[in-house]
Amino acid sequence: MGKLIIRHESRSDQDIRDLFNSNIDTPNSQRILYVKDAKQLSSILSSERMSMLFDLNESKNVSELTKKTGRKQEAISRDASILEAAGLITKTKKGRQTFLKTRVKKIEIDLS
């Protein structure tokens, strides 16, 4: 499991320049997610989705999460798709079941 750094999208051009100018290698375990504003960040990391991340230190299937949280399967699946698109979890199909697991152990928000 790696680390996710969340930054404002205005930093992306500077990060790319820094990467090429200094020949810095970004560790494979580190990912950067650029967001345009606080509203976008809160839509990705809602309280329900943060709770899911805490529950997914070990791989769990969607059915297990619905039982544990009392939420509907559709809500869990929707949130899982959003978290997967943001690079925070992986989804693996085994037969008819979908297993979810977090990809990050640490989330850092860079306000600079």
Image: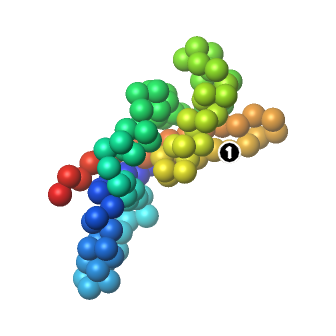
The residue at 43%/64% (across/down) is: 28
* Amino acid of disc 1: Thr
The residue at 40%/27% (across/down) is: 47
In terms of secondary structure, where does tag 1 sit?
strand
Up-down relation of residue 112 to residue 26 (above or below): above
Measured from the top left, where is residue 87 in percent x and y?
A: 50, 52
Left-right relation of 16 to 103: left
Measured from the top left, where is residue 3 in percent x and y?
A: 36, 51
Measured from the top left, where is residue 63 in percent x and y?
A: 68, 24
The residue at 67%/25% (across/down) is: 73
Residue 12: quadrant of the picture: bottom left
Up-down relation of residue 66 to residue 42 (above or below): above
- The figure's colour scheme reads rainbow
Count residues near mark 1 (Cα–Cα under 10 Å), then give few for <14, some for 14-19, many for 20+. Answer: few
- Of residue 68 and residue 85, the one placed in the foreground of this image is 85
Which residue carries the number 1 mark? Answer: 92
Measured from the top left, where is residue 89 in percent x and y?
A: 53, 44
